[in-house]
Image (tube, helix red, strand yellow):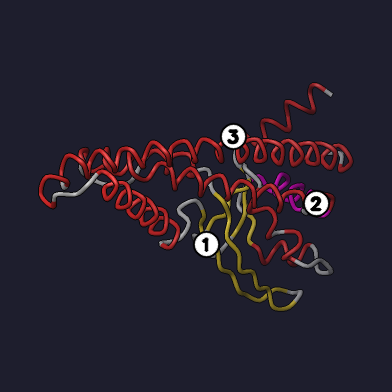
Amino acid sequence: MAKKKLGRWFAEYIKRSTRYCRIGSVVLLPVSLIMAWLTYWIIWVTLWIGFRPLFDLSNEAVGYWSCFFLALIFAWQFLRGSEFEEEYRFAGESEAGTVTLNFSRATGNGWVLLFDPGVAHGFFKVLALLYLTAPRMLGLALMLHHKADRLKQMDVPACSQVIGLLMRAQGRVPIEKIADEFPDADLSEIVQPLADVDGVVFLEKNGTGLTLAPRFMEEFNEWMEAS
């Protein structure tokens, strides 16, 4: 496997991934605002039908309460933490010395979580979908924006060396082995950024390790055949 070809392909892959994240963020941001406006009116109708007769609320009061509950929904969604990230913690010893990593990665589950509130009963799923879609969309837009920034700052040539190691291994590679293979490298610069690369899989069973998704390998092989 030619290192130069892998480096060139990986640079194109990261550039494309960054562009997709930017597009996703730009598209989702206005859509989330539109959904917030729709959510406001869903809350308004709910309060107008369910609570206005009980408490003799004016339409103006219903509007104020709708704004309050909309703000509360957004605050609750964001204060409970991002649903679109997984936390990874690693600390161990290798021939290069102490290896310590502490980072989070965005996962492909973001799009699924956006439309699956994770509530057991169908009725509550519908309610959660109605009320939480707007803040979830906004959260996903921000996540994609930050992910694009991280991808843009990635040391692509250095990270492509780790990708080459994973391709040669064709299986799980412990972080300790990566540290041994690149003793002079800062793992926070060559491993941590890979958490944002779709197709790089972090495994925690029997210690933290990395592997590549089959589709990632297939894309590279297809590019090699076409080049």
Q: Secondary structure at mark 2?
A: helix
On screen, 39 above or below 186?
above
Q: Secondary structure at mark 1?
A: strand
Q: Residue at x 42, y 44 (%)?
A: 113
Q: Nearer the viewer, residue 148 or 99?
A: 148
Q: Amino acid at mark 3?
A: Val
Q: Which mark is residue 27?
A: 3
Residue 69 at what x, y percent from top left?
32, 53
Q: Residue at x 53, y 43 (%)?
A: 108
Query: Pointer 2: what residue?
Result: 161
Q: Is residue 113 left or right of 139 when viewed as pictured?
A: left
Quadrant of res 112: top left
Query: Pointer 1: what residue?
Result: 87
Mark 1 to mark 2: distance in Å?
24 Å
Which of marks 2 and 3 precedes in the sequence? 3
Closer to us: mark 3 or mark 2? Answer: 3
Mark 3 to mark 1: distance in Å?
26 Å
Q: Residue furthest left?
A: 54
On screen, 47 above or below 94?
above
Is 161 contained in the magenta span?
yes
Q: Which residues are magenta?
A: 158-170
Q: Residue at x 32, y 46 (%)?
A: 63
Total labels: the figure holds: 3
Is 196 contained in the magenta span?
no
Closer to us: mark 3 or mark 1? Answer: 3
Q: Nearer the viewer, residue 190 or 50?
A: 50
Closer to us: mark 1 or mark 2? Answer: 1
Image quarter of the C terminus: top right
The residue carrying pointer 3 sits among few (fewer than 14), some (14 to 19) or many (20 or more) residues within 10 Å by Cα, namely few
Q: Nearer the viewer, residue 173 or 4?
A: 4
Q: Amino acid at mark 2?
A: Gln
